[in-house]
């Protein structure tokens, strides 16, 4: 399994996953579909500071598989930076997250959406805040 990693450059992502399917310059993201996986990578100062990974729907059945525990372990191992992963209660809500023992990297699996995310701590705080703001805007719409 080719693994996305925090700190990789857009060039490294292209070498691993080919040319991006979508380039969103406003959001700073590149989107790839590769080997049955959908990857959205965000870049800050030329380095990946978070990526989201989900499975693509099966072309025949349309069913979307979940990111397996084994795949999550591979992603955590590749992004541990030599540190151990600790399972913690999420900052917002009741879900659990993983974070490295140096608190630099956070991994989060949104089971409902089937999306696995790996973030620098700073990117995780910003991403989480945007999710809360977007949800509150959706909740206030008529």
Image (cartoon, rainbow, N blue to C red):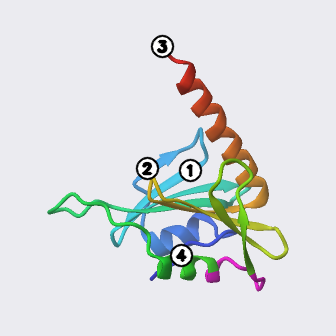
Which circle's residue, 4 or 3, is located before the other in the chain?
A: 4
Q: Nearer the viewer, residue 47 or 126?
A: 126
Q: Overall secondary structure of the magenta stretch?
A: loop
Number of other residues with Cα within 10 Å of mark 3, as a class: few under 14, some 14 to 19, many 20 or more: few
Q: Residue at x 59, y 38 (%)?
A: 26
Badge number at residue 29: 1
Which circle's residue, 1 or 2, is located before the other in the chain?
A: 2
Looking at the image, is 48 positioned above or below residue 134?
Answer: below
The image shows residue 127 at horizontal and vertical percentages of 67, 47
Secondary-structure class at tag 4: helix
Q: Is residue 101 magenta?
A: no
The image shows residue 134 at horizontal and vertical percentages of 59, 32
Which circle's residue, 4 or 1, is located before the other in the chain?
A: 1
Q: Which residue is the site of mark 4?
A: 72
Q: Nearer the viewer, mark 3 or mark 1?
A: 3
Q: Residue at x 53, y 75 (%)?
A: 72
User: Label 4 to label 1, Cα distance in Å?
Assistant: 22 Å
Which circle's residue, 2 or 3, is located before the other in the chain?
A: 2
User: Label 4 to label 3, Cα distance in Å?
Assistant: 38 Å
The image shows residue 70 at horizontal and vertical percentages of 48, 82
Secondary-structure class at tag 1: strand
Q: Dots 2 and 3: beta carbons under 8 Å?
A: no
Q: Nearer the viewer, mark 2 or mark 4?
A: 4
Q: Residue at x 60, y 42 (%)?
A: 27
The N terminus: image quadrant: bottom left
| Residue occupying the far top of the picture | 142
Q: Residue at x 63, y 67 (%)?
A: 9
Q: Nearer the viewer, residue 39 or 20?
A: 39
Q: Dots 1 and 2: beta carbons under 8 Å?
A: yes
Badge number at residue 22: 2
């Amino acid at each position: 399994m080719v693994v996305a990693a925090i700190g990789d450059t857009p060039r490294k992502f292209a070498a691993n996953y080919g040319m991006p399917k979508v380039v969103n310059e406003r959001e700073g993201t590149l989107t790839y579909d590769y080997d049955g996986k959908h990857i959205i990578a965000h870049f800050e100062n030329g380095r990946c500071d978070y990526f989201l990974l989900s499975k693509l729907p099966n072309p025949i059945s349309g069913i979307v598989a979940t990111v397996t525990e084994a795949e999550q372990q591979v992603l955590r191992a590749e992004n541990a930076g030599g540190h151990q992963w600790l399972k913690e209660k999420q900052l917002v809500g009741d879900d659990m997250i993983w974070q490295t023992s140096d608190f630099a990297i956070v991994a989060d699996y949104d089971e409902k959406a089937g999306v696995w995310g790996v973030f620098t701590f700073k990117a995780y705080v910003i991403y989480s805040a945007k999710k809360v703001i977007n949800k509150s805007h959706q909740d206030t719409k008529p």
